[in-house]
Structures are given as structure tokens and as C-alpha cells.
Image (tube, helix red, strand yellow):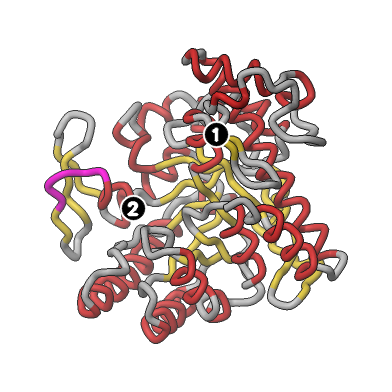
């Protein structure tokens, strides 16, 4: 059985389409990974997530180590059986959540000491512990532990975090390789850091390549720097990473972000946006997002999106979904989330087809022109 193999089937400029082969199944790229933070893609059953076209989902190390606990998940047979998802799962390292959610954090060379956002209990998350948690969960794609600092940080802070992330990458690699049976079937990705600085990004990429990983993530973006700054960084960052390995842009994003990132050579994405937006009444459509809570939809007999094949659009009218969402009914969040996940997977299939047909730029401009027209 293949542990991990990435093949590129076609390219069009910097955009690529291909396949990641793993023991639990193949992942078509460019790929969007729905986020299952706490062992669930919110408001969705795993079979329905798969039905939307998702090949892989993301789980969160920080949240799962705090509740229900990685050791408990391991005793119950691992994350796949625990949540009923038998295809690949990527787990993030927990580094972002430690920095953004926790109180009283203290960063040292050992790792990050923090207070749980749930009950204030103290924990230490180090490269070794992060990899151990991901091993206990049974992750298929494991992320190295890294240090994220905002792009608005001082150059010195950015340089120090980038350097520490390389050292933590080496320790993550060493701990992963000690993983026995898990290391024989899982993959490990490194995370490039360096904020918006091309030189720091190059140094980070070179350090990670020297260590050696199955794939490489562009980290530290989509944290408030704005789309143009992010795209400026993506003009050089993916090209600093190995062409024959998957490139994963963490935490992105909006549909137009994804299109522009694929144009620049990115293969994998994750974001809470389609599920979070579904729960708050925003539906994504090819003509831009709509707020189904608006009164104008109260008697609208059309589906959320014309010609959308998702179960929500083929069964229910906007008026009904509007009623559910305005009434706070759980079904409203379920139907909206289902549509949004289908939209994102249709977006990815369209991008894959466009690269394969060597018409990516025309497809991208047509999509962006329509999607942004009402913005």
C-alpha cells in the first residue's frame, strides 16, 4: 500500500492538478479540506461531507488534546473510527490556536506553555507533544509544530519565529520518525514561515528542504494582512518550495482567494468559512455570497443557487431556508452548510478541470468576474 505519493497530472502556468495517494484513499488536487475542529465538521454528518465531494478533512490538535483528550481518542480506536470518517485526515499542529485562543502563553525554545481557554488548566505544547498528539489521533497528514507571529510583528520577531520554527521542524521530524507503525503509513508536512518577507521565506524554505518533508505548507498568512498582501507573498513563496511536493496554504479561504492561490501554484486549502458562514446565514454562489436572513428572500421560490446540484438546492426554496435560519432552527444551519460545502467542492472541481484543459486563466477570470461583480 502507498504511504504517500504525489503525482502532477497537468499544469497550466503555475497552476497544477494531480493526486495525493495514501492508504486511506486518494486526494484530488487542488483540494479543499473542510474543517472538523472538534472531530466534527459542524452541522454535517461525515457521509454528507463525503457526498459533497471532499476527499480529506482537517482535525485540530489543540482542541482535541484538550477535549476529549488525545489519549482518550486513542483508547477509542483513533479519530477516524471515533468520528466515522474513514478517508484521510490532516491534523494541524495546534500552534495557531495556542497563540490565538489561549491565555498566559509563554514561548520558549522548549515549546509553548499556555492556559486552556476551556478551564484555565496549564499545558505545554512542544514539537514532541504536538507530534505525539497527532499520532494518538491517528492522523494521516501530520503538521510540524511551528511558531506563528502576525505579519505586523517587528522584523526581529518575524526572524526569531522563523528560525525557531525551523528548529522545531527538525524536532518534529525526529519525533515523527520515532512513531513506528504510524510513521510507516502517515505523512509529515513542514511549514514555511517568514511573514511577508521574501528573504525570510527563502531561508525558511531552504531549512525545511534540508530536513525533508512529504509536503510543505505556506504558513503565517490569512491572519489579517489583507488579500493583496497575501497574494504578493504567494507570488514568490510557493516557488521557493519543491515543485514535486504538495503545497498547502493554511487557513485559506474565500473563493476568490483560492482561485488566485491556485493560479500561483498552491495545491491544498482549508478554512472554516463555508461551515461558519452556513451557520450565520451566508450562502456562497457563483454570483457572490448572499445573506439568506434578508427579508427579500421571505417569499423567494428559487433555490439558494440556480443549477446547483446539492441536496439543499434540489429540494428546498430560499423562502424555506430563510424561515429556518431566521427562526434559529438547526436544520437551517445544516442546509446552508451543506450547500456551502458543495459550492467549495464544485469550485475545486472546476479548477482541476480548467488546469487539465489548459484553460485556467480564462476560467479564473470568468469565475472572478462573476463572483466579484456584486462586491
- Please provide percent x and percent y for residue 322: 58, 20
Pointer 1: what residue?
Answer: 291
The residue shown at (17%, 50%) is 113
Image depth: mark 2 or mark 1 in front = 1
Alpha-carbon span between mark 2 and mark 1? 29 Å
Choose top left, top right, bottom left or bottom right for residue 298: top right
In the rendered view, tell whether residue 347 sits above or below residue 363.
above
- Please provide percent x and percent y for residue 195: 36, 72
The residue shown at (49%, 13%) is 327
In the rendered view, tell whether residue 276 sits above or below residue 286.
above
Q: Is residue 40 visible to the viewer in this orientation of the structure?
A: no
- What is the secondary structure assignment of the residue under circle 2? helix
* 139 relative to 305 in the view: left or right: left
Which residue of the protein is positioned furthest toward the front in this rendering?
296
> Which secondary structure dominates the residues rendered in magenta?
strand
Which residue of the protein is positioned furthest toward the right in this rendering?
357
* 52 relative to 173 in the view: left or right: right
**Which region shows up in magenta?**
101-105
* 338 relative to 210 in the view: left or right: right
Pointer 2: what residue?
Answer: 96
Choose top left, top right, bottom left or bottom right for residue 211: bottom left
Counting other residues with Cα less than 10 Å from the Cα at mark 2, is it few (<14), some (14-19), or many (20 or more)?
some
Question: Is 182 included in the stretch rendered in magenta?
Answer: no
Question: Is 102 included in the stretch rendered in magenta?
Answer: yes
In the rendered view, tell whether residue 217 sits above or below residue 317.
below
Count of numbered badges drawn on the protein: 2
Q: Is residue 73 visible to the viewer in this orientation of the structure?
A: yes
Amino acid at each position: 500500500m502507498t504511504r504517500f505519493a504525489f503525482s502532477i497530472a497537468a499544469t497550466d502556468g503555475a497552476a497544477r492538478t494531480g493526486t495525493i495517494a495514501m492508504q486511506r484513499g486518494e486526494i484530488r488536487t487542488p483540494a479543499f479540506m473542510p474543517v472538523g475542529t472538534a472531530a466534527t465538521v459542524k452541522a454535517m454528518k461525515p457521509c454528507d461531507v463525503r457526498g459533497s465531494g471532499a476527499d480529506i478533512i482537517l482535525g485540530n490538535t489543540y482542541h482535541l488534546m484538550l477535549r476529549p483528550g488525545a489519549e482518550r481518542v486513542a483508547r477509542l480506536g483513533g479519530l477516524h473510527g471515533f468520528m466515522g470518517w474513514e478517508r484521510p485526515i490532516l491534523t494541524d499542529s495546534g500552534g495557531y490556536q495556542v497563540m490565538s485562543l489561549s491565555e498566559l502563553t509563554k514561548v520558549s525554545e522548549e515549546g509553548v506553555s499556555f492556559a486552556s481557554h476551556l478551564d484555565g488548566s496549564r499545558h505545554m505544547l512542544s514539537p514532541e507533544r504536538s507530534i505525539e498528539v497527532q499520532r494518538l489521533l491517528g492522523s494521516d497528514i501530520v503538521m510540524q509544530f511551528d511558531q506563528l507571529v502576525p505579519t505586523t510583528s517587528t522584523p526581529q520577531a518575524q526572524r526569531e519565529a522563523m528560525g525557531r520554527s525551523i528548529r522545531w521542524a527538525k524536532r518534529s521530524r525526529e519525533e515523527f520518525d520515532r512513531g513506528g507503525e504510524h510513521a510507516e503509513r502517515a505523512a509529515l508536512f513542514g511549514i514555511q514561515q517568514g511573514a511577508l518577507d521574501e528573504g525570510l521565506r527563502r531561508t525558511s524554505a531552504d531549512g525545511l528542504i534540508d530536513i525533508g518533508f512529504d509536503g510543505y505548507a505556506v504558513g503565517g498568512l490569512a491572519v489579517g494582512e489583507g488579500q493583496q498582501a497575501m497574494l504578493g507573498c504567494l507570488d514568490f513563496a510557493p516557488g521557493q518550495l519543491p515543485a514535486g511536493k504538495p503545497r498547502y496554504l493554511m487557513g485559506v479561504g474565500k473563493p476568490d482567494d483560492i482561485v488566485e492561490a491556485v493560479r500561483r501554484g498552491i495545491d491544498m486549502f482549508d478554512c472554516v468559512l463555508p461551515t461558519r458562514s452556513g451557520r450565520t446565514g451566508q450562502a456562497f454562489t457563483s454570483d457572490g455570497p448572499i445573506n439568506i436572513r434578508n427579508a427579500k428572500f421571505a417569499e423567494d421560490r428559487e433555490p439558494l443557487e440556480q443549477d446547483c446540484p446539492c441536496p439543499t438546492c434540489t429540494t428546498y426554496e430560499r423562502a424555506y431556508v430563510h424561515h429556518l435560519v431566521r427562526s434559529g432552527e438547526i436544520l437551517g444551519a445544516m442546509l446552508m452548510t451543506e450547500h456551502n460545502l458543495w459550492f467549495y467542492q464544485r469550485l475545486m472541481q472546476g479548477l482541476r478541470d480548467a488546469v487539465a484543459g489548459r484553460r485556467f486563466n480564462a476560467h479564473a477570470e470568468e469565475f472572478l468576474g462573476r463572483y466579484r461583480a456584486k462586491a
